[in-house]
Image (cartoon, rainbow, N blue to C red):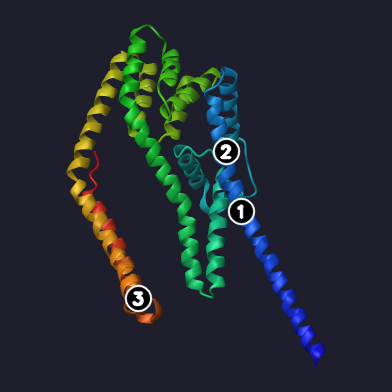
């Protein structure tokens, strides 16, 4: 009898040890993937940004790295995704990553999405709830796309704020007798991130022999900004048909400045609606937390009863639809 008990204890200890080893291996792989897919590209980007402000040789190497990073890298995952989603989808994803200032390969980004989705699905299966796993997988897979969208909007807003002064500086440089390429180089030195960095890339690319028109087209692909596309289109048309480019730059700067003024007025007029939307969105959550601390037995019915789960789900969907509806009401494009 004692031998049987010793065997059972040994078996349980072995299973416990194997479980700990598996947990350690899973955590190690998770953190390793996070480092390779998130931290390492970020550190690489920071290093490249420092090099960009250094000598001309370092800036030249920066552009060479950028071109090889985007045009020459391939992976085993990319051809499979191209067959499933189509080449156009991969090109759109690559363009979105560039516009978000994320110099990743599409395969790296998709690998991160797959890793997050599998992590969410695994968490749901550990809780023995398949639908929870599917929901977590969809939510975690959506987070990288949300991050890219937020980075795109932030970069676009910063560039739009820099556009009026940049166009005036470019116009004054052209009137002073500078060529267009030297004026772009001067603007890249005087204007900060991100527009100055993008203009420096344009200047260095045309020095490599890419051609100013092609370098400007690549600039339009890297930046999701209507105002910058106005500048690119104006320069491309002027190089083919001629005209007073300095006057065109001044007009673009004036139009962009007036549009930003109008956007500021619209934002001020819709501040009340935006504050109401935030308040109505946070009020149910605040009341739930208040009741949780003041009368926990009363509110725990929503967390313990099946009907409470349905009510919470319905409330969440209703709040989400209300937030989307109010955002559509107060959003005015200018």
Sequence-wise, which precedes: disc 2 or disc 1? 1
Neighbours of disc 2 within 10 Å: few (<14), some (14-19), many (20+): few
The reply to whether residue 230 is in sight is no
The location of residue 106, given as percent across then percent down, is: 55, 45
Total marks in image: 3
What residue sits right under mark 1 in the picture?
31
Q: Which mark is residue 238?
A: none
Q: CA distance from mark 3 to mark 2?
A: 46 Å
Residue found at x 56% / y 52%: 112
In the rendered image, the vertical position of residue 103 relative to residue 35, given as above or below: above
Q: Position of residue 131 (x, y in %)?
A: 48, 72
Residue under pointer 2: 43
Compared with 153, 273 (above or below) is: below
Residue for badge 3: 296
Q: Are marks 3 and 2 in contact (CB under 8 Å)?
A: no
Q: Please determine whether, in this image, residue 68 is positioned above or below residue 333.
A: above
Mark 1 crowd level (few <14, some 14–19, many ≥20, 10 Å Cα): few
Nearer to us in this view, 32 or 76: 32
């Amino acid at each position: 009898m004692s031998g049987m008990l010793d065997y059972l204890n040994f078996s349980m200890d072995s299973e416990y040890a194997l479980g700990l080893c598996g947990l350690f291996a899973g955590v190690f792989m998770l953190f390793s993937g996070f480092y390779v897919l998130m931290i390492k590209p970020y550190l690489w980007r920071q290093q490249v940004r420092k090099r960009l402000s250094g000598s001309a040789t370092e800036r030249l190497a920066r552009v060479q790295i950028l071109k090889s990073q985007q045009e020459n890298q391939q992976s085993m995952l990319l051809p499979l995704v191209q067959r499933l989603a189509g080449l156009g989808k991969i090109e759109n994803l690559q363009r979105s990553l560039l516009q978000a200032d994320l110099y990743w390969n599409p395969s790296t980004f998709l690998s991160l999405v797959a890793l997050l989705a599998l992590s969410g699905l695994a968490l749901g299966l550990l809780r023995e709830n398949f639908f929870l796993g599917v929901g977590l997988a969809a939510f975690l897979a959506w987070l990288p796309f949300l991050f890219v969208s937020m980075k795109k909007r932030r970069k676009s807003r910063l560039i739009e704020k820099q556009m009026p002064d940049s166009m005036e500086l470019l116009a004054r440089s052209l009137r002073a007798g500078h060529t267009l390429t030297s004026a772009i180089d001067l603007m890249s030195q005087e204007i900060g991130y991100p527009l100055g960095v993008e203009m420096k890339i344009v200047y260095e690319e045309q020095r490599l022999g890419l051609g100013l028109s092609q370098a400007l087209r690549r600039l339009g692909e890297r930046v999701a900004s209507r105002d910058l596309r106005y500048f690119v289109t104006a320069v491309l048309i002027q190089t083919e048909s001629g005209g007073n480019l300095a006057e065109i730059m001044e007009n673009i700067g004036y139009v962009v400045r007036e549009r930003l003024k109008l956007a500021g007025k619209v934002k001020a007029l819709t501040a009340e609606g935006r504050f109401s939307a935030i308040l109505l969105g946070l009020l149910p959550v605040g009341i739930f937390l208040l009741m949780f601390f003041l009368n926990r037995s009363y509110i725990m019915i929503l967390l313990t009863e099946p009907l409470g789960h349905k009510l919470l789900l319905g409330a969440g969907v209703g709040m989400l639809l209300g937030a989307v509806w109010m955002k559509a009401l107060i959003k005015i494009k200018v």
